[in-house]
Each structure stands twice: as C-alpha cells, then as structure tokens.
Image: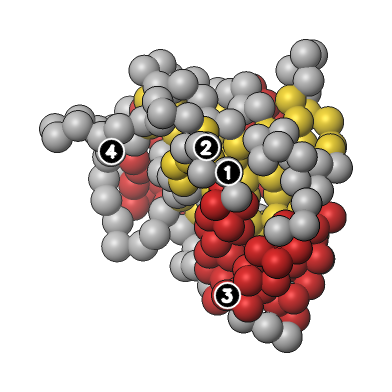
Amino acid sequence: MSHSTPPAALSHQLDSPLPRWKPATWENYLAYRDNPTPERVRLFFDQGYLFVDMSPEGINHARFRELFTMLFAFWFSRQSEQNFDLLGGCLLEKPNQRAASPDLVLYLGEDSPQHQQGEPRRINLDEWRLPELVGEVGDTTFATDLDEKKQLYAALEIPEYWVVDIRGKRVLAFRLQDDGKYQQCESSVALKGLPIILLEQTLEKLTHQTNGTAALWFAQQIANL
C-alpha cells in the first residue's frame, strides 16, 4: 500500500465481518487519521500493522464503558487529594511507531495532557508522559484485546492494562513487568489496591440492573475498604 492510498481504498482492503490487523505503513495509518469519516473510527497501529475498528458502538459496549467512568469517579472521591484525568477514546500516538485509541485512559497527578488551540487533538507520547492505566472494553474485539492490543500496550510501556470482557463479565488486569511483558494481577496498582474481583462483582449487577445502580453498589462496597 502506498502513501497515497485513500481511506476508501484501504477500507475495502480491510473489509471483513470483524476488524482485523492488516499489513500497512505509517502513511496508511495517517491517511485514516487525517481524513474524517462519518463513522466512529478507532485506530491502532503497531510497527507495520493497522487495525481499524469502524463498528458502531453497541448498547452493551456503551453501558460497560460508561460504568467504568463512574467507578473511577467513586473510587477517587474517597481520596480528595488525588487528581485524576479520564481521557478514554483519545488517540495515543508514538510517532512513526505505534498508535492506539483505548476505551479507558487514566492519568494520575497534575501533569496530564492538555490541548492548546491549534495543536493536534491527540496525545503525542513524545511530548506527554504515559497514562497510568489504559483499558479495552471487549465484545467483538475481545480476542485482539488479549493478544495484539496487549502486545501493543506493553510495547508502549503502559504500566497497567485492563481488558473488560462484556460477555463473560470479567476484568482481566495486567501489570507491566521489568522484562516488558504483562503479568495478570489480582489488584490494581493505579487504583491503590482495588481488588479486581470487586470490579467483576459489579459487572454481574449489569445482568439485571442499570450501570448507574451497579456503580452505586460499588460505591457502597468501597466505603468499607
């Protein structure tokens, strides 16, 4: 694929029942990034492979993703001194190497990325520090969330990575090790000891309840931690 390959042509080449990783250049990635489409597009690039998720967001994906926004807020409400910034869906980019659009992006502290008028609307990781945690809400993309995307986030050196399994109502949490690989963990470091099993118990509430009710239940449980 050449530098001039338009997004429409790339879309045809990438067309499949489910999005897949395809060989591509950084220029191919830029063609998608810089040419808006009517659809909601999430982009991932990892040294020669491109993943374009053009699937419309379903009810379950939206419900689970917004649940985690509420869970983060309730968790940090217990720690008034802790500043946090949630930038889920924002494009993270290591120019000429890697890019990703995680569902969940958590920055802790004062120096989270800030947008200035006239600057690109993405997070350039050559200019801004890494987030403490990123996560993917997996439904149709669950397999790649646990494989290629996991490898991508490890290569970006993201300290903590969560995969939220919508169908299985599970949260698989991983912590980056000294060897550059993720190891599954039972409690969060970014959220200072939050048991992952409590997240899964909260997800179970979604079987018969709204995400707002589930989030309020979570708030009651952490009050005693």
Q: Count neighbours of disc 1 (C-alpha within 10 A) and say few if under 14, some if 14 to 19, many if 20 or more.
A: few
Find the distance from the CA under tag 3 to the CA under tag 1: 21 Å
What residue is at 28 percent from the left and 38 percent from the top?
A: 121
- Judging depth in this view, the residue of 56 and 168 nearest the camera is 168
Contact between marks 3 and 2 (CB within 8 A): the answer is no
Mark 3 surroundings within 10 Å by alpha-carbon count, few (fewer than 14), some (14 through 19), many (20 or more):
some
Q: Is residue 129 above or below residue 162?
A: above
- Between disc 3 and disc 2, the foreground one is 2
- Going from N to C along the chain, the mark reached first, 3 or 2, is 2
* Residue 215 - label: none
Measured in 3D between alpha carbons, the distance from the residue under mark 4 to the one under mark 1, in whole angstroms, is: 30 Å
Foreground mark, 2 or 4, reads 2
Instruction: Tell me if label 1 and label 2 are in contact, CB under 8 Å.
Output: yes
Q: Which residue appears at 74% of the width and 76% of the height?
A: 205
Q: Name the residue under label 1.
A: 79
Read off the residue under disc 3: 212
Which residue is the site of mark 2? 82
At mark 2, the secondary structure is loop
Image check: 189 left or right of 129? right
The N terminus lies in quadrant: top left
